[in-house]
């Protein structure tokens, strides 16, 4: 079961976040592309995890996971990528197999593998990614069992340790940066993208007194939902170039595969204003075209900038990692027990059928003539005895196996 479980991971540790952005797959195309991958490579399960600073592929296969298979993996999933990118991704991803892959997922969801240790947002992202892939028919029993233990482990970490009690998430870091810049509470704020990160960011700013929001999103219904929460206006993303109310702050985090804010759109948004603007761009790849920063008076707060800030925060939280590691060890031990029990359960699945077959053969063949000599009352009592013994024979092997496992 677990031996067929593998992970290919691309994170801030081994790749530039802009390079990782090339692996992003728009939500509208995930089902089609991941299903094609699963069928083409004969994978039994697939899960796709994409955040602002990591992309990971969790999958199950009976095939040997070597360079050849990984190369086919990326050629199949990203036919639009240049051969040099394909080769780079093939040889540079972090590979995990079996129980090491399970431990990696635990570490990711518990945030100690994150760019910002203690970032609680990751557990939601992991769970949502699983649910999306499950609903697309991509995952199965193995990933389901692993993710159930993953979520349980992460909850223990956040409940029993102080690793997340002083928030240093992307949202919190961005807000503290704004606070240090003394952004006025009446600042005109454009929120581009209505995903989880921008939802969190918008609600965080509203909580701290900001109130002038305009929300843009490709799916207007999502823009409307967030705008109503923020008591702002909502607009389709396509109307960004015609927005004429001006702005002081842009918060952008979309799933676009290219820049959303071009120099032309930015010029239009300025409405002739020359004052310095602030752009919080936490998308991967960046939503803001780099030429804007070069040619305009703008403070660009990107994931890259936040990564530098988080380096200092890691020192504050490092003392909690030992406690987290203890929880992870306990959880891995527990999971190994779960896997052994599931192996026994799978092996025992045929016991009920085998017992029923033995009963049927005894009644209808071996002792058929003897049973015909019995009166109805005797036959009824015998049937009860056989039924009782049948249930015991079905349950006893499993009970004994569990007792052995517990020793």
Image (cartoon, grey):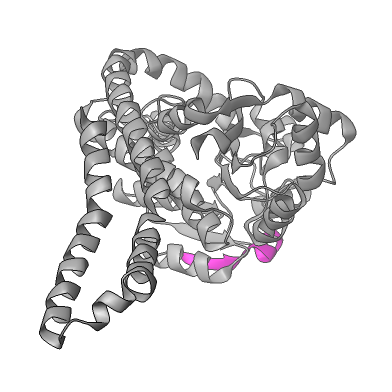
Left or right, 39 with respect to 308, comes to: right
Taking the magenta stretch, the answer to whether it contains residue 108 is: no
Q: Classify 228 as above or below 341.
A: below
Q: Classify 4 as above or below 267.
A: above
The number of numbered discs placed on residues in the rendered structure image is: 0
At x 81%, y 33%, the residue is 86
Residue 141 location (% of width, % of height): 47, 51
First to last magenta residue range:
233-243
In front of the other: 79 or 269: 79
At x 43%, y 53%, the residue is 199
At x 41%, y 35%, the residue is 109
Quadrant of res 51? top right
In front of the other: 287 or 186: 287
Taking the magenta stretch, the answer to whether it contains residue 235 is: yes
Position of the C terminus by quadrant: top left
Left or right, 220 with respect to 335, comes to: right
Let me know if residue 93 appears in the view: yes
Residue 395 location (% of width, % of height): 23, 53
Q: For the view shown, which residue lies furthest in the bottom direction?
A: 376
In front of the other: 304 or 301: 304
Q: For the view shown, which residue lies furthest in the right direction?
A: 83
Residue 363 location (% of width, % of height): 32, 73
Quadrant of res 229? bottom left
Q: Classify 283 as above or below 377.
A: above
Let me know if residue 184 appears in the view: no
At x 26%, y 83%, the residue is 372
Q: Classify 156 as above or below 24.
A: above
Residue 230 location (% of width, % of height): 39, 60
């Amino acid at each position: 079961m677990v031996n067929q479980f593998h992970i290919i991971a691309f994170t801030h540790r081994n790749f530039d976040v802009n390079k990782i952005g090339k692996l992003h797959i728009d939500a509208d195309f995930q089902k089609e592309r991941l299903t094609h991958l699963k069928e083409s490579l004969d994978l039994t399960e697939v899960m796709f995890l994409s955040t602002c600073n990591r992309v990971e592929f969790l999958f199950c296969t009976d095939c040997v996971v070597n360079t050849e298979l990984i190369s086919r993996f990326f050629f199949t999933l990203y036919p639009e990528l240049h051969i040099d990118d394909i080769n780079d991704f093939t040889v540079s991803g972090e590979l995990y197999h079996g129980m090491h892959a399970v431990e990696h997922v635990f570490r990711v969801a518990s945030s100690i593998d994150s760019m910002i240790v203690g970032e609680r947002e990751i557990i939601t992202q992991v769970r949502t990614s699983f649910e999306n892939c499950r609903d697309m028919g991509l995952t199965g029993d193995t990933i389901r069992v692993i993710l159930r233990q993953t979520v349980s482990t992460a909850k223990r970490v956040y409940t029993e340790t102080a690793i997340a009690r002083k928030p240093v998430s992307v949202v919190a870091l961005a807000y503290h940066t704004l606070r240090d810049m003394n952004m006025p509470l009446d600042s005109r704020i454009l929120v581009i993208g209505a995903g989880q990160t921008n939802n969190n960011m918008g609600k965080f700013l509203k909580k701290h007194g900001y109130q002038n929001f305009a929300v843009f999103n490709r799916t207007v219904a999502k823009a409307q939902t967030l705008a109503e929460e923020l008591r702002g206006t909502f607009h389709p993303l396509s109307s960004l170039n015609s927005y004429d109310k001006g702005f002081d702050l842009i918060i952008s985090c979309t799933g676009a595969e290219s820049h959303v804010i071009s120099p032309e759109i930015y010029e239009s948004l300025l409405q002739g204003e020359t004052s310095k603007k602030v752009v919080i761009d936490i998308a991967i790849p960046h939503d803001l075209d780099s030429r804007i920063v070069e040619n305009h008076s703008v403070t660009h707060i990107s994931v890259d900038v936040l990564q530098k800030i988080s380096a200092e925060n890691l020192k504050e939280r490092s003392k909690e990692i030992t406690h987290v590691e203890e929880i992870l060890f306990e959880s891995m031990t527990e999971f190994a027990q779960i896997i052994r029990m599931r192996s026994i359960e799978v092996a025992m699945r045929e016991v009920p059928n085998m017992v029923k077959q033995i009963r049927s053969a005894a009644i209808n063949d071996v002792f058929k003539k003897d049973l015909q000599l019995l009166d109805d009352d005797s036959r009824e009592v015998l049937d009860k005895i056989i039924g009782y013994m049948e249930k015991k024979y079905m349950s006893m092997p499993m009970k004994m196996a569990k007792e052995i496992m517990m020793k």
